[in-house]
Image: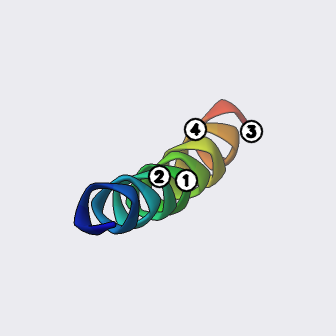
Amino acid sequence: MSIACCCYAFSRFVHTYTMKCTKSFSVLQR
């Protein structure tokens, strides 16, 4: 149970971080 929760939290963190990186990258390309 705790492992699944940890995996879920990690996936959410990675998703948020990826979105920030993508936005920053798109801004830099302009």
* Amino acid at circle 3: Arg
* Amino acid at circle 4: Phe
Task: Tell me which numbered mark, 4 or 2, is placed earlier along the sequence.
Answer: 2
What kind of element bears circle 4? helix
Q: Which mark is residue 30?
A: 3
Quarter of the image for residue 4 reads bottom left
User: On the image, numbered disc 2 is attached to which residue?
Assistant: 11
Q: Which of these two is toward me, 4 or 30?
A: 4
Q: CA distance from mark 3 to mark 4?
A: 9 Å
* Amino acid at circle 1: His
Q: CA distance from mark 4 to mark 1?
A: 15 Å
- Residues at circles 2 and 1 in contact by the CB criterion of under 8 Å: yes
Q: Which mark is residue 25?
A: 4
Query: Which dot, 3 or 4, sits closer to the camera?
Result: 4
Label 4 Cα neighbours within 10 Å, binned few <14 / some 14-19 / many ≥20? few
Quarter of the image for residue 9 reads bottom left
Q: CA distance from mark 2 to mark 3?
A: 29 Å
The outermost residue toward the top is 29
Task: Tell me which numbered mark, 4 or 1, is placed earlier along the sequence.
Answer: 1
Relative to 8, does residue 21 appear above or below in the rendering? above
